[in-house]
Amino acid sequence: MKKFVILLFSLILFTPHIFAEDFLFQGSVVFNWDELTQEEREENISQMQKNIFGETLPEKKIKINDFKTKYKDYLKDKDYQKHYMAAAAGYKEYKEYNISAMYFKRMSSLYMYALQKKDEPMTIYYYDALGNLRYVDNIKGMYPNFPYYAEQYRRSGTLAGVSYFTSKDTQYIFKGDGEFKGVWNQYKFYDKKGKVIMQRSNY
């Protein structure tokens, strides 16, 4: 699942979300997932699915031509060298952007960075080291207040998944089809039965 060490799906500054399909990703909400009964967890999952998806799932596939048209100005980061260096240097802001870096697990080289325009905070763009767009997060809800959620699409236009943020510490992760994958709380990732199945070094 992911963390900015990335995408599932690190959470720094603007709490981007990268999904576990690829890598290790303000409020006063009390987290007690591991203390709930299985019935209570199932009820919570069901309620969150309704909060996020309503009666219909997010668009699972955006036609590639429509995706390229919608994000035509962001398919290539023209200043990728400057942004890459800023992200690698640990900058959290660079000019008009919030910026964040992602690293492969157990590797020191930066493989991806994320940009969020300060005046357009509801969209986050993820770029590879050469400035090619890889993912787009569309944020929905009360952002930057909680709760809010983000739909993440691959460059191909397919829905990678949805992250539901109830606090800075806690993010519930769903697949593109609405299936629950698990919940991050601080350093631990729990499955639907309350078992810790993954950990991360920071968040």
Image (spheres, rainbow, N blue to C red):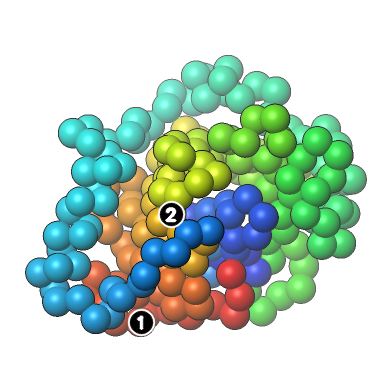
Q: Is residue 192 above or below residue 140?
A: below
* Label disc, if present, on residue 7 of the rendered structure: none
x and y, in percent, of residue 32 in the image: 30, 75
Report which residue position mark 1 lands on: 196
Amino acid at dot 1? Val
Q: Is residue 89 above or below residue 134?
A: below
Q: Position of residue 141 (x, y in %)?
A: 42, 38
- Is residue 163 at least partly visible in the picture? no
Report the residue at 22% width, 43% height from top.
50
- Percent position (x, y) of residue 62? 42, 27
Judged from the image, the secondary structure of the residue bearing numbered disc 1 is strand
Left or right: residue 173 versus residue 142 is left
Q: Disc 1 versus disc 2: distance between alpha carbons?
A: 19 Å
* Horizontal side of residue 59 vs 198, given as left or right: left
Residue identified by numbered label 2? 165
> Which of 101 and 49 lies nearest the eye of the viewer?
49
Question: In this rendering, would 91 be left or right of 138?
Answer: right
Which residue sits at x=89%, y=45%?
A: 82
Q: Earlier in the sequence, mark 1 or mark 2?
A: 2
